[in-house]
Image: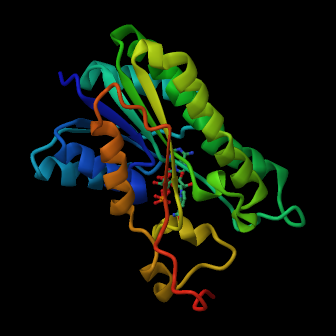
Amino acid sequence: MDARTVWVTGAGSGMGRASALIAAQDGRAIALSGRRAGALEEVAAEIRAAGGTALVVPLDVADRAAVKAAALRIEEELGSIEALVLSAGLNSPRRYWRDQDLEEFAAITDTNLLGPVSVIDAVLPGMRERGAGTIVLISSYSAWRFSPDAGAAYSASKTALGPLAATLNAQENQHGVRACHLCPGDVDSDFLNQRPEVPGAADRAVMLSPEDVGRAVSFVLTSPPHVVIDELVLSPAKPAAGTAA
Ligand SMILES: NC(=O)c1ccc[n+]([C@@H]2O[C@H](COP(=O)([O-])OP(=O)(O)OC[C@H]3O[C@@H](n4cnc5c(N)ncnc54)[C@H](OP(=O)(O)O)[C@@H]3O)[C@@H](O)[C@H]2O)c1
């Protein structure tokens, strides 16, 4: 049993994967969740090959019963959950009022907003009881500064993560629980395939990498318990004046 367990959602790829690998190097046991078991198994194999501990817990974060069952399984197999990195996220190429679909809007909100709420809800009682817990909400630059092309459902659901972190800090810091609203700008990951126009190699080359964000997550997780990092915004270096596309 390891008391320093981190549960990562969206752990099979991108920032979730990078955060999981770095947290494992920091000596934490990692529970890996996402819908594709195969992708999670690959990350688990990388962690184990480096001498770390990983548990694969396939999960759709929109399935509330499955979230509760997953939390119980992780606590049984890895011990109490010390931290959450909530990276599972969804967008759609149809992101304007003229073309959006209400079912898709609901799926984005279920994944990006209610997903994190249900995972937090499942672990918060234990964190409060132990007087310790760190929750990193992987949100978006578009939640920090309005970005018109991010999409109505995506912007609305990610912007709501700010108040989620703020209410956690206002109500739960006194119980040893802290939350960070982490807002990355463009990151070169599979997520970009959900854009109406998928960026090419040249555009991706100047973006953040998932590892850049993984390091920021590690900074939040490893900061002393009395330090609350309410919000953390990361963006790629701006191009020289006059060169922006
Ligand atoms: N890339 C960017 O430019 C960018 C910028 C700012 C913020 N973000 C946010 O960063 C987070 C991570 O994205 P990423 O860039 O690392 O892209 P990514 O590699 O596509 O990661 C997203 C992950 O979420 C998982 N996921 C999606 N729906 C899920 C569900 N219902 N239940 C469980 N897992 C689910 C996916 O795995 P499965 O398909 O296996 O479930 C995938 O591993 C997302 O929340 C995204 O909104 C991305």
Tally the numbered discs: 0
**Residue drawn 62% across and 40% down?**
161
Rendering coords of residue 174 (x, y %): 46, 13
Q: Tell whether 120 sits left or right of 55.
A: right
Rendering coords of residue 35 (x, y %): 48, 47
Residue at the right extreme? 98
**Residue drawn 32% across and 26% down?**
225
Residue at the left extreme? 51
In the depicted structure, whether residue 174 falls above or below residue 159: above
* Residue 172 is at least partly visible in this image: yes
Q: Tell whether 218 sits left or right of 157.
A: left
Rendering coords of residue 230 (x, y %): 50, 37
Q: Quadrant of the N terminus?
A: top left
In the depicted structure, whether residue 156 falls above or below residue 206: above
53 or 211: nearer the eye? 211
**Residue drawn 62% across and 39% down?**
162
Q: Tell whether 145 sits left or right of 60.
A: right
In the depicted structure, whether residue 219 falls above or below residue 141: above
150 or 32: nearer the eye? 150
